[in-house]
Structure formats: structure tokens, C-alpha cells
Image (spheres, coloured by chain):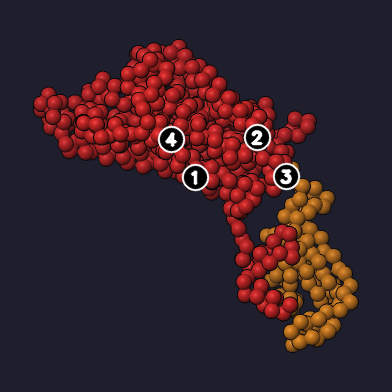
Chain colours: A orange, B red
Amino acid sequence: MKKIEAIIKPFKLDDAKDGLAKMGVQGLTVSEVKGFGRQKGHTELYRGAEYVVDFLPKLKLEIVVPDEDAEKVVLALQEACHTGKIGDGKIFVLPVDDAVRIRTGEHGDAAIASS
Amino acid sequence: MFRRPLTRTVLTGAALLAASWLAPGDAFAQEEEFDTALFTANNIWMMLSAALVFVMHLGFAMVESGLTRAKNTTNILFKNTFIPCVGILTYFLCGFNLMYPGEFNGFFGFAGFGISGGFAEGANTPSYASGGYTYWTDFLFQAMFAATAATIVSGAVAERVKLGSFMIFSTIFVGLVYPIAGSWKWGKGFLDAAGFYDFAGSTLVHSVGGWAALVGTLVLGARIGKYGKSGDVHPMPGHSMPLATIGVFLLWLGWFGFNGGSVLSADPALTSFVLVTTSLAAAAGCMGAILAYSFVSSKPDLSMALNGILAGLVGITAGADVINPTTSILVGFIAGGLVVASVLLVDKIKIDDPVGAISVHLVCGIWGTLAVGLFSTNPDHSLAIQAYGVLCYAVFTVLCAAILFVGLKVTIGLRVSEEEELEGLDLGEHGMRAYDLTGSPGFMEESGGSMKGVSLASQKLVRNEN
């Protein structure tokens, strides 16, 4: 199994979800996160004074899929979240040792597959 | 905004006009026995004006909470709740009779505690104020006015002032300083005798509050982190532009009573005229601020446009009845430009005023008072006398505010601890958040491990399992 972590622009969530649904992805966890990359934040203006927002709001998606699906899912995400402008985000792929479905106690691929 | 004394001069004319409007050709007969219907109509308008000025306190509360950070919202709302309440009580106790002592030396007079004058013979008949209103209406309208001066200070010292110290300050300020200062003009004191003019309080209310706000911010110092060591400004954006917008519109609404009621009768021509100049100046103030800010940034700033409306309103307040509609647009427009320049300048010299109270109420209050000297249709008004009035109020208010603020600073302390300021005054002063999401799905206590964010049912479950 692989865990795919994607840091994306917040307004791309719907596109990402639709793209993943087409791939048959069964589950998705989203969290609101903040951070910076090469973009290094941006400036905002309040009552005449500029200030730098160091940490930009992004969304983090976490998806766990069987090894063989990982590449396709990453590609789908990359296409869905792409605008071509700086700040589009990153996708990370990590190995996963095991997974457990809490309701049934199933382990491994069975825990993340649709039954 | 005078009481009895002036109404004899100005309002008798107005009443005659109004009486002739009700009963053409019978004006002289009406002078002695005032028309009851007219008296009632006048009094209703004055009570409605008092209610409108009351709404301004909600406006101030919304503007101030919107333009400050979420962690200090309960605190600023508490201050805005306390001020009108203590204001009306102190005005009952001594304020009313300090501000309108009757015959006095022109600087300080006191006609006694309480408002039992309302039971005197004729206090609630047309003979009290040329048929403009009753004694009770008079008290209520003036009491609603009084607290606004202290509310102005609240915004400027927000996010760092100790609650108890501020409560002491505002009680004394609204109970003693404002009425004594007010008596100099509206109570027929020495400034009135000198020919100084302030229709509804550009100076008497707004710059008095503004001077105290300036002194308060100077004695307190800036909020932690507002100014960097190299002189850079770190903005602390207000947490709710919708609240700030609601507040400004409520203030504009309230100003119909603030200025409209200052006519001191429902005189058809004069009240409607005053509402026109008031609204034109407010609208022009917004335009002036938008234009001025466009030289600073290509993106319009809502908080500046809102401050511009207030600037226009404060600016026209001194001369709403003596400045022509066309000129009122100019007065408001300049006030709007002034407020933007002033906000930027105040920041530049590192005076930390979170809501722009100094710029709106002090700077535009002075401008409006001087504008009477420049544009008044009454040839008796002069720029020199207006400036003299501004100066008198500056000296007195700065002195009083400095004594109060410095006195509080060296005794019980004026500022919350650094830790409390960083955590927010809501928890530090009140132990209560303004926006408490405890119990909402997905909400977790910051400290973790606490049971506060968990529903009662699941808490019970966990306890049973233990």
C-alpha cells in the first residue's frame, strides 16, 4: 500500500475529489494546513500598511491506495490540481506498512478495498 | 444643542415659523399658549432622536469589535456595554446639572445632584424649552449623548488596556470631564459668550473623546508587535469587516438623531435641512476617503471607506445647520481625505490606534469646528473664535485625560500583562471567548486532553469505561 499526501490550493479541492472519484478511490482525508514553499508567502494590505503572510493556507489530502494504483492516482491528482502558476503544491508518496478497518478488523489491502 | 437659554433666541423664531406652518396667520396668538399638538410632535421627535443616539452605542460596539482581533472581542463588547450604562447613571447623578447648571460663572457650575428638576412646575410644559421638549426628554437625549465621548476612547485603547482601569477612567470622564467641558458652550458658559459655535458636537463630543483617545494611546503605548525595531509597521487586521460595516451604518442611522435632535425641536425646515447636510457629508466623506486611499494603493480598503463615512459625519456635526448642502459635500469630502492621511500619519509616528478613533473623531472634529468658521452662513461665526474654542477644549481635555491615565498607570496599572495581551483579553479579563465553538463537531480544545470540547454524552461514556 501507498499513502499519497498532496498539498494543494484550497479552491482545487472539488477538482481533486472529482478526479479521484473517477479513478475509483474509496476514501479521502482533507485537512486545512498552512505552510510555504518556493513561493514564500505573499503580501497583503491593511489600512495602508503592507505585511507579509508567511504561511499560506493550503489543503492537505491523504489517500491510501494499493501499490498498483498509486501512480495513476498521483497522475490524476497532478492533472486535477494543476494551474501552471506558482503555488500549485506538491504530492508525496509514502510506503504504508498496514491498514486496519476499525469496524471489521480487516488488515492490509482488504481494509482499504471496497467490499 | 443648547437648552432653555438659547431656545429663547433661536427656537422662538423656529417655533413661530412652525406655529405659523400649523396655523397660518395665527402666529402671534400661538406664542403665548403653545399648540399642544406641536409640543407633542416636537417632543416625540426629540425622544426618537434620543433613541437614535442610543443606537449609536451599538454602532460603536460593532465598529470597534470588527476592527480588532477576535481574541479581544468579548472585552471590547463589555466596555461598550458598560459605557452607556455608566454614562446614563452618572449623567443622572451629576452630569446633567454640571453641563446645564443654569446661571453660572462660565467655567464651572453645578445645580445639584439628581434630576428632581423634572418635578418643578412647568418643567414638562411648553414653557420649559419653547415647546421643543420636556425636562425628561431633555435629560434622556443629553444622557445618550454623554456616553459617546467615552466610547470613542474605548476603540483607541483597545486590545491592551486593563478593564478595571478603563472602567474607572470612563466613569470619571463621562461623569465629570465631559459635562464640565460641555457647560462651556451648551450650558451657556464662557465659550458660548465668546461666540464659539458647535451645533451638535464636533468639538464638544468628538474632539473631546478624540483628545482623550490620543492621550490614552500615548500613555499606554502600542500593542505588542505592532511596530518593528526598524520602524516598520505590522498591521493587525480587524477580524470582521461585516461587523465594522454594520457598525458604521448604525452610526450613520444614529447620526440622524445626533444631529437631527440637536435642532431641539421638530422644526420641519431645519430638521430636514440638517438631515440632508448630515447625509451629504457622510457620503462625500466616503468618496474622499476612497479617492485619497487610491493614491496609496490600487486596491480600495473597506475600513478606510467606512472611516471616511464617519469622518464626514463628524466633520459636518459642528455646522450641520449653518452650512449649505453644496458646501457640506465639500466639508465631508475633505474630512474623508483627512481621515486617510491621518490614519497613515498616526501609524507613521507610532501611535497605535486600532480603529482610527483619533483620526476620525479628533482630526475631523477639529476640521468640522473650523469649517464652521470658514463656511457658515451665519456672519457671526469666525475662524478665530472657532480655533479658540478648539484650543480651550484641547488644553482642558488633554490635562484631565493625562491626570486620569497617568494616575491609573502609577497606581493600579493601565495595561494588562504581556502574557495576557498575547493570549487575548477575552480569556485574561473575562475568561470567556467571543466565538466559542466548544461542542461543535470537529472542534478540539487547544490544550488537548481536555474534556471541554466533547459532548456530555461521550464524556459520560468515557467515564463509564474508566
Q: Earlier in the sequence, mark 3 or mark 2?
A: 2
- Chain label for disc 3: B
Tell me if label 2 and label 1 are in contact, CB under 8 Å: no
Q: Earlier in the sequence, mark 4 or mark 3?
A: 4
Q: CA distance from mark 3 to mark 2?
A: 15 Å
**Which of label 2 and label 1 is nearer to you?**
2
Task: Reply above or below: B386 against B80.
Answer: above
Disc 3: which residue: B419
- Residue at image point 27% right, 40% down: B44
- Chain label for disc 1: B
Q: Which mark is residue B413?
A: 2
Q: Amino acid at mark 2?
A: Gly
Q: Amino acid at mark 3?
A: Glu
Task: Reply above or below: A3 against B33.
Answer: below
> Considering depth in this image, is B108 or B59 the residue closer to the camera?
B108
Q: CA distance from mark 4 to mark 3?
A: 34 Å
Q: CA distance from mark 4 to mark 2?
A: 24 Å
Disc 4: which residue: B90
Q: Earlier in the sequence, mark 1 or mark 3?
A: 1
Q: Where is residue B373, by image quadrant? A: top left
